[in-house]
Amino acid sequence: MKKIERFRILVMGRANAGKTTIIQRVCDSTDKPEVFDSKGNKMSCWLVEVHLNAECSQRGYHRIEHELIFRSNPGFVFHDSCGFEAGAAEEFDQMKDFVVDRAATPRVNERIHVIWFCIPMTESCRTVTAAEQKFFNECDTGHVPVIVLLTKVDTLNLDAIEELEDEGWEIGGAQGRIAEKERELLEKWLAHIKHELGKCKFPPKGYLSLQKMDQKSADCSTLMHWTANVLNEEDLQRLLISTQQSSIALCVQYAVHK
């Protein structure tokens, strides 16, 4: 454990799933991360810009082994899978090779410690896609746990309003009912995703919904708590808790109980 200098996280999911926003909040930063290649060389600014805005037409510039590091918290190293879709066999194979290699590499300082798999709750993305089923059926991450993060949960607000209007509610005085309907919709989609991924060969270790992550004041302590809980080694838990800056209370809790 003394050889592991930083906590390493692979962030996965579709394009525009909110991955960059999450890692910015975790590191309490609105800046763009510094990006380093697999040899530790810092990439130039224009390549960083391409990396953060990588779409299908630009993926040739993006490599999953690139390291994303924020100056506000250099104890975290992030890898971004970019958005992979069903049918993109070459991209899937590259991602799978990276996961398998970094999960079991004898170079302990290069191992990934956890995978955050983002599924956005935007209307066109809520169902489990063939690409996600392929990952959870074919990618054995070994001892590296995978947590599914439901992102962009706040978009359910409009769906809740529409459903209540269809039911004849006057929206102006139904704020409490809107919040209740949002929770119902979230529970429905979470149950659906758990059911679909639970049938896969290598299902995730946990599920967590993230709200208001677009706000600078977003609370990441729950994400840190869940991540610590799914880790298999107490030393890795200790490394994560000491690296995160989201919650002093979390540090105290682990100091007392662990």
Image: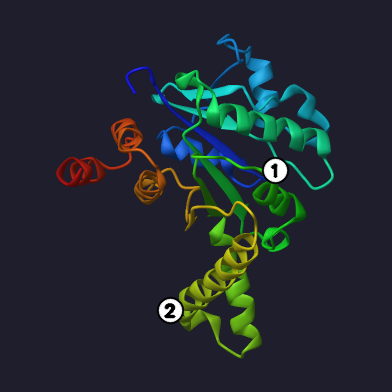
Q: Is residue 243 above or below residue 34?
A: below
Q: Residue furthest bottom?
A: 168
- Is 240 on the left-hand or right-hand side of 127? left
Q: Quadrant of the C terminus?
A: top left
Q: Disc 1 marks which residue?
A: 15
Residue at x 57%, y 73% (from the top left corner): 188
**Quadrant of residue 52 within the rendered picture:** top right
Number of the front mark, 1 or 2: 1
Residue behind mark 2: 176
Choose top left, top right, bottom left or bottom right for residue 89.
top right
Q: Residues within 10 Å of mark 1 (few under 14, many from 20)?
A: some
Tell me the residue at 39%/50% (across/down). 226
How crowded pointer 2 is (Cα within 10 Å; few <14, some 14-19, many 20+) is rated as few
First in sequence: mark 1 or mark 2?
Answer: 1
Q: Tell me the amino acid under the disc marked 1.
A: Ala
Mark 1 secondary-structure assignment = loop
Determine the secondary structure under disc 2: helix
- Which residue is more in the foreground, 107 or 225? 107
> Can you say whether 246 is above or below 68 in the image?
below
The residue depicted at 69 percent of the width and 46 percent of the height is 138
Residue 190 vertical placement versus 59 (above, below): below
Q: Is residue 86 left or right of residue 118?
A: right
Residue type at numbered disc 2 = Gly
Foreground: 222 or 70? 222
